[in-house]
Every structure is written in structure tokens, then in C-alpha cells.
Amino acid sequence: MAKLAAAGHVAGIDLSREMVEQARARNATAVQDGRVELRHGSVEDLPFDDNSFDKALTINSMQLWPDVIAGLREVRRVMKAAGSIAVGFTPYSGQPNKGLAEALTAAGSRQAHVVESDKGFCATNCPPITSGAQGQRSQTLPWREMDSNLYGAFAVK
């Protein structure tokens, strides 16, 4: 993720200390350079100021949150008004995609919808991208180029 946000700052939080340590080890150079900040904590009490982030991504973690709507509201709190949220799941997560767009909407996101592919699915507030000669609407899943070892809630300033 730090490679994709080379001009930005990536902050990550995870309830599992083990996952935070693994992410620090895998991203040691970016952490040392100050481009990546990784913390232990809960999505329901993010240690960031209001309106701090442009983008937020979580992969294979929302199904573990004690209160999904409270967690998504907290993510919205730290997001800028036009910020993008993506809540992704691989086929191995065990998370059904039913109700995800509604959860994002209940937490204050607009244009919430679910994007599916053979690699998994993602609930997002990003508008679909129009591409192709016939104006077909499509959207790539946000983790396609992401470091698959970064789970938890990650955001870019």
C-alpha cells in the first residue's frame, strides 16, 4: 500500500498485536522512512483526528468487529468529506456480502454498493468507473494491487 501512496502517509490499526508486528516487519523500510505508521487499537476508537484521511481500506477484518455500524461511523469520522472507503473480503473470510452496502449507508456513506469478482468482494462508497466503448460500468477491487499482508483498517492521508 505504501508503494501506491508514495506521496501520502499510510496509517494502520489492528486489534491484534501479532498482526501489527507482522505488518511492521513486512513494511520495515516504509515504517523507518515515516511513510507508514502502524498501531495497536480498535476500529471503534481510532486514534486519529476528525477529517484526517482521504481513503480507508479494511480487508478481512470487519466480520471481527464487535459493532459494525459503530466501527464504520468511526471510520467516517476520521475521513474527509469526499473520502473513499473500501471494505474488502477474500473468499476465505467467511463474510457474506449481504447487507454490506446498507451498513456503509447506515454509517453515513453515500453511493454505497458492493463490487464482486473471483478474488472476493468489496463494499465501497467509490462510484463505479465507466470504461469501454459501450460505456460499461466496472470497478476494480481495491486490494488487487495491495500488499495482501496488510489487513486491519488502513487509511491514506
Image (cartoon, grey):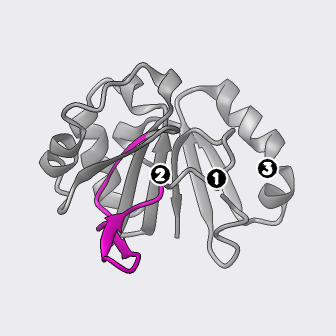
What residue did someone put label 2 on?
Answer: 57
Amino acid under disc 3: Asn
Q: Residue at x 79, y 50 (%)?
A: 27
Label 2 vs 1, first from the N-terminus: 2
Residue occupying the point 82% across, 66% down: 33
At mark 1, the secondary structure is loop
Is residue 124 one of those drawn in magenta? Answer: yes
Mark 2 and mark 1 residues within 8 Å of each other at the beta carbon: yes
Q: Residues within 10 Å of mark 2 (few under 14, many from 20)?
A: many
Which disc is residue 146 wearing?
Answer: 1
Q: Nearer the viewer, residue 63 or 111?
A: 111
List x then y, in percent, for residue 62.
Answer: 39, 32
Q: Is residue 16 magenta?
A: no
Q: Is residue 49 visible?
A: yes
Secondary structure category for the residue under label 3: loop
From the top left corner, tell me how far across and down residue 90 is, in percent: 50, 32
Percent from the top left, x then y, of residue 86?
A: 40, 52
* Residue 50 visible in image: no
Between the C-alphas of marks 1 and 3, the distance is 12 Å
Task: Find residue 27 and name its label.
Answer: 3
Could you say which quadrant of the image residue 151 lies in? Answer: top right
Magenta part of the protein: which range?
Answer: 121-141
Q: Is residue 41 left or right of residue 124?
A: right
As drawn, 53 above or below 59: below
